[in-house]
Structure formats: structure tokens, C-alpha cells
Amino acid sequence: MERIAVMFPGQGAQFVGMGKKFHDQYNICKQTYEEVSDAFGKDISKLCFSGRTADLWDFTNMQVAVVTTSIAIYRAYMQEIGILPRFAMGHSMGEFAALTCAGPLKLYDTIKILSFRGNLVKKIIKSDIGKMTIVDNLPESKLLEIVKKYEGKIYISCYNSQNQHALSGYDEPLQELEAELSNMGAVVSPLMSSPPMHSPLMQDIRNEFFALMNTIKLYSFNYPVIMNTTGQLLNNEALLPKVMADQLVSPVLWEHSVKSINKFGSTIAIEMSPKQLLSNLMAEILPNGEIKSAVYGVKDEREQLVEELNSNKVNFRGKVNFPGICLGILASTPNHAQTDESYNTVKLNYDNIVKLKEQDAENISKAMDCLLNALRAKKVDYIDNIIKKLIDTTNTMYDLSGVLN
């Protein structure tokens, strides 16, 4: 069985037209854009498909557009292939897409978080305190040596690969360093209108963002996420407010993250992006091809992935038997009530789901009602987490809208 990791891109994935083919082909993708538009208060499909480039590069718009498109692509993957990943990872703001698909965040809340985060970051942009730049073709050891001269003024904010890094720092020192690096033969690419992300220069907004994250209802992980700030997996949702607040002021350890999924035995990494970005970095980090990669948002790569999985006799999940999955959940959930009334209620609803399973595998709403009745009769105190995982892993978030408040 292939051990799949999924990757979600950050800044740089955006372009006018991204995600349109998925929106037009998959109803669940269309519904995803509609949900985001409702949460964001702006037509995100129009912004992504036919908006102005300048609008798409606005920091808040860009965050929401990239995360929405990545999640829509992931949901198309779950519909077509349906193999639950072993791990997820997201670069910078892509981590919010990873956390949404892996379970802890609801999409609606994710968009509210990104809107708030965007407004906070714009305060930093308006203060004109500093900026961010990408440095290619310079070994990490050499870059570390040079940056040392600018201690307290410039920070390495993304460790993307041995030969690609991001720098964040105060304007004048960073301009001076950019010229120095260019003269050494490095390729320097300043990010226009970008704040000094993932560095101590973002400290002024860190606590405010932490406070917001503490107001968000979090759910259990369906599978772990490799986090930017540590390069290690996380599957405890209680730690997310601090970890995501720290992401503002701490560097993105992307190279370390890729090496982690390799250590944990991933065989395929699927980039949920409208274009190739993170797969290029993976090829640099693991040049011997230890992990195969594919970009699900690129048609040729998607078709090649499907062909390869077929050739390896990997069984796609195919059509989900929703009542059957409900039966499995019900059978494996302990009964904390232990009364005759509870037993009779559980048995009645179990038998009803069995009938639904035999009649129609798509009888989702009735099966969910029976499952909820039985779980409540069992006095289960983590029902929301069970239902969230069921909805995520069966891609039924719009068939069952309103089940989770």
C-alpha cells in the first residue's frame, strides 16, 4: 500500500484562472468556493478565475485564494482516489489548508482566521518596517555565514532547500544584503508588498493572533500534520493556537519537514496545488527520488499518478458506502450508558442503518440521523470529533451541512 503525504503550497501558487477547471468539473469544488465566498464576504471564484492580478496579490486575498484552491483540489482527490493520507504538510499559509483537510479546522473557521491574520499582517505592511526576499543558488552554510553580519536585522525565514531560502528583515539592511548576494552569483527575488513573515519582526501581532486562535473550536486530527516551526508531526489539536501563532515569528523548516515524511516512510507526496512548486523543492531535497511526487492540480501529472497507482495495484476507495461506515463507527464506539433503554435505542438505530446499507449506499442523511441517535444513547462525549472525521473522510460536508455547528 502506498503511504501518501499531501502538500499544500503558500505564496507563489496564485495566478488568475487557478482552480477554474476543478470548479467547473467537480461539484464539491464549486461548493467549496461558494462556502468560502460566504465566509469571506467576497466572490472568491471571481477573484481566482477572472480577477485582476493586483487584487489577487493583495495579502489577504492571496491567502484565501491559495488556501481555497488547494482545499478544492484536495477534495477532488478524495472524490477520485480517496486514499486517506498518512501525513499532511503546508508551506507557510498552506499550513492552514493542511490543518483544514487533516481535520482540526472547519473550512468556514479557516477563512475567518485567514481574514483576521491578513488584517494583522497589513498593519505590519503599512508600518513599512521590513520585507521578504527569496535567495536561490547559494548554499545554506554560506548564507548563514553572511547573515551573521546582520544579526538582529535580517533573519532566515524559510529553509526551503539547501539552495533556496527566504530572508526577512529591515528594509535598508536587506537591500544592502540583496546587492551583496547578487554580486556573489546568488539569484535574489524580492517579494513585492510582502511583510517580513516568519521572523521576530512580526512579534507585534503574534499575541493578538494567539488570542484569536484560542477562540476557535478545534477538532481531532484525522492524520498528523508536519508543522513549519518544528519540522515534526503534530496530532494534538490543543497545541495549535501556540504553534500557529509562533509560525508568524519563527522560520519555516520546509527541508526538515520533507526529510521527516521521508523518515516516516512516505512513498508518494501529492502537491495539492494549481501548479508545481513544492515538488521542485522535494526534488532538490531528496535528489535520489526517495519519495515520488505529483501535482494534483496539473492534468498530466494527475493522470500519470492515477496510472502509476493502478500499475501498483493500489485500490482506490471508489464509491463510499456511507451507511456501512456508520455501522463500523457505531460498532467500535463504547457504550457509556449501559442501560436497557440505551441498548434498545442503539439496537434500533443499528438495525435501521443495516437496512439503509442494503437499500442505498448513498442514503447519507438518514444514516447520519441514526448514527447520531445511537451515539447520544451511548452517552458519547466526543460526538463532534467522530462526525467531523466521518464528514472529512467521506467528502460529505455539503450533503450534511449543518450537522456540525
Image (cartoon, rainbow, N blue to C red):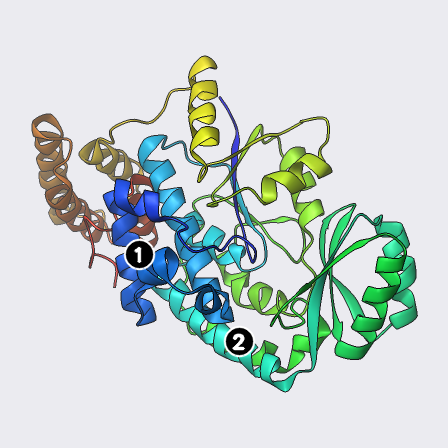
Disc count in the image? 2
**What x and y, as percent, mark residue 62?**
48, 64
Circle 1 packing at 10 Å, graded few (<14), some (14-19), many (20+), is many
- Say above or below: 19 vs 35: above
Residue shown at the point (46%, 54%) measured from the top left: 97
Q: Earlier in the sequence, mark 2 or mark 1?
A: 1
Q: Which mark is residue 33?
A: 1
Which residue position holds label 2?
Answer: 209
The residue at the point 44 percent across, 69 percent down is 55
Q: Say left or right for 62 vs 45.
A: right
Cα–Cα span, label 2 and label 1: 25 Å
Looking at the rendered structure, the kind of residue marked 2 is Phe
Front residue of 370 and 225: 225
The secondary structure type at the circle numbered 2 is helix
Residue 174 in the image: above or below residue 73: below
Instruction: Judge from the rendering whether residue 302 lies leftward or rightward of residue 197; answer left or right.
Output: left
Vertical side of 252 occupied by 200: above or below:
below
Residue 347 visible somewhere in the drawing: yes
User: Residue shown at 67%/66% (left/top)?
Assistant: 198
Q: Position of residue 278 (x, y in %)?
A: 60, 44
Which quadrant holds residue 351? top left
Identify the disc placed on residue 172.
none
